[in-house]
Image (spheres, rainbow, N blue to C red):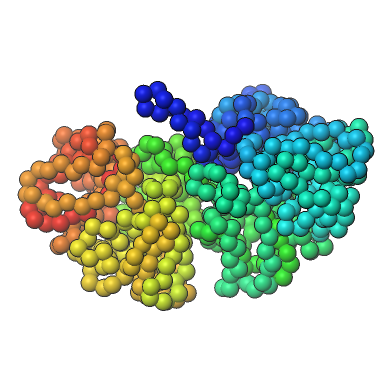
Amino acid sequence: MSNTKTVMGQAANTLTVPLNVEDVFSTYLFESSNSVTPLTITNNIDLSTEGGMVWVKTRSAAEEFHQVTDTERGANKRLITDMTVAENAAANYDVVTQFNTDGFVYSDGYGATRNLASWTFRKAPKFFDVVTYTGDGTNPRTISHNLGGTVGHITVKPTSSSGSWWNFHRTLGAGKALSLNATDAVINSNNFWGGVEPTSTEFTVQFNNNAAGVEYVAYLFAHNDGDGGFNGGDIIKCGSYTGTGTNTPTWNDIDVGFEPQFVILKNVDYTTSDRYRSGWNIFDSMRGWTESSVSTLSAHSSDAEGQAAYCKLTPNGFSVANPNFNSTDTYIYIAIRRGTKVPESGTEVYSPDLLDISGVTNGDRFITTNFPVDLNMRLLRSPGSWVARVTDRIRGGSELYTNLTNAEGTAPSYSNNSYSFDDNLGVVNRSSDTNSYSNQLSYSWKRAPGFFDVVAYTGDGVAGRTVSHNLGVAPEMMWIKRRDSNAHWFVYHKDVSDPTKPMVLSLNNALGTATVFGTHTSSVFELDDTFYTNTSGATHIAYLFASLPGISKVGSYTGNGGTQTIDCGFTSGARFVLIKRTDSTGDWYVWDTERGIVAGNDPHLSLNSTAAEVTTNDSIDPVSSGFAVNQLAATNINVSAATYIFYAIA
């Protein structure tokens, strides 16, 4: 077991590289329908070689259990976190029946269509381990493990007999324990861990966790503190915080050192049974963790998924402003970082789709990609009151429009929140409107280091304010929109004549004159105190783009009045091209290979205009290294001596 992986390099050589979060953890959502056909879940986690644990819970139906299976005990052996029963002792037998090199096989014993969430933890040093042992009644007793780093959290469950799930957490110490299957407050006792802190190679059990002849399983979660050895840095933190007792608009920011994609949160002081305030809350960004609410399941309960308000993600952790998660009690958490993998191809992070479909019903996936979508832009190809409808995972389903100044959610047509991002392979319809997706175009982006990021923030009205981000490099282009008021989209681009000045996405104007932007780095971007980007108390959304070799290019060129090739460093041409003139008026033109980037006429739309799609001119042409631009009066994208900015994706 290692926290590095070996990949093929040049000339058939091998290269050992650090693991990414994506190699060891996955949240995967799926639908089961019956017990006849097992479901093969491909989440790219190697369980059969490396080992690990799979945790599955039905989202929509109560009285259906949290199912836990691991490679140490073997397939077809299920435990239930919300019950004390022994292994396989409960009815309604859902279980993982096989562990694969890229996921697992799941069999459904209910025989009904249900939406499920799964969390997969792969064994890896300084991340996660699974240990089984048979109690011998010797107290205290040490058990060896292979975590190889700081132990952040341990969960122990007897498997051959009934018994509670007892939990150690590093911030509480070895003289305390919590029960995963209950909402109880922390217990002060050495009867679980013998009062002995775990080490990087062993942990101690006593009495309740070491009854003679009883078989046990232990799940160990690491705590990284600059020592994880993973790509991008630490990927798991087991910490605690004390609530401030304040409610919105005052937030309590919990800094874990990274933006999490998964959190288990528990109040250790509250003594009254309450699903949220004293329960084991499970949050993840796949099921929904927006600026307004978080979808939560409870490890101690079979209840269906619920929604909790005032718990949001931040670039450095999460923030709470709700009595459930911010009373003046102590809370513990396990947090796992969002993805750290740098993409290797454009198809991993960007997808264009034509939406010439009808009959889409509520709950259907109507945009299919091969990745979880973090930003979607849906474009009308015929005239309407809007041209590009913009939603993202962080804000949920609330719309913004590239050609309009409308505040968030003030839709000119259709209903807000009509689709959602709780899908690993696309976008799901959440509306009864079955015919609103005909003759439209969709662009989808995935957040990834060096490629694209999304940041929601609240303005403070202070010039020189910096906002944290997770792009991993300095942003080369940013689109910023104030959400709570009518306001234009302001655009930063590194190659305009004065990068502190904005372009305006919702207009065809030349470069603006106001100072808006400051110095941007790989971790923050800087803003002035403008109405559009940093009004005190106002909510904003920022989309950050960067050049990633072979995949994306943020650049510029000077027109030559004829035809010229724009070299993006690609090998198979551009699949998406955005061009804007900066020294004079000009539309924000977009082309894509889904509609056609060919040697002949190429359909295009303008993000700032409701004009219908134009199909009658040949303004760009395909080139393997990027694209070529042709000077035509229809678009004027190569006027001699004129200056242009562009964004392209391979």
Q: Split into 4 quadrants, where in the image is the N terminus?
A: top right
Q: Split into 4 quadrants, where in the image is the C terminus?
A: top left
Q: Position of residue 351 (x, y in %)?
A: 37, 40
Residue 23 vs residue 578, the one in the foreground: 23
Q: Position of residue 492 (x, y in %)?
A: 30, 61
Residue 7 vs residue 47, the one in the foreground: 7
Residue 123: quarter of image: top right
Is residue 502 visible in this depiction of the protein? yes
Q: Position of residue 517 (x, y in %)?
A: 32, 67
Is residue 68 visible in this depiction of the protein? no
Q: Residue at x 23, y 57 (%)?
A: 495
Residue 43 vs residue 548, the one in the foreground: 548
Q: Residue at x 8, y 49 (%)?
A: 560
Q: Residue at x 39, y 63 (%)?
A: 525
Residue 34: quarter of image: top right
Q: Position of residue 371 (x, y in %)?
A: 46, 39
Left or right: 261 in relation to 388: right
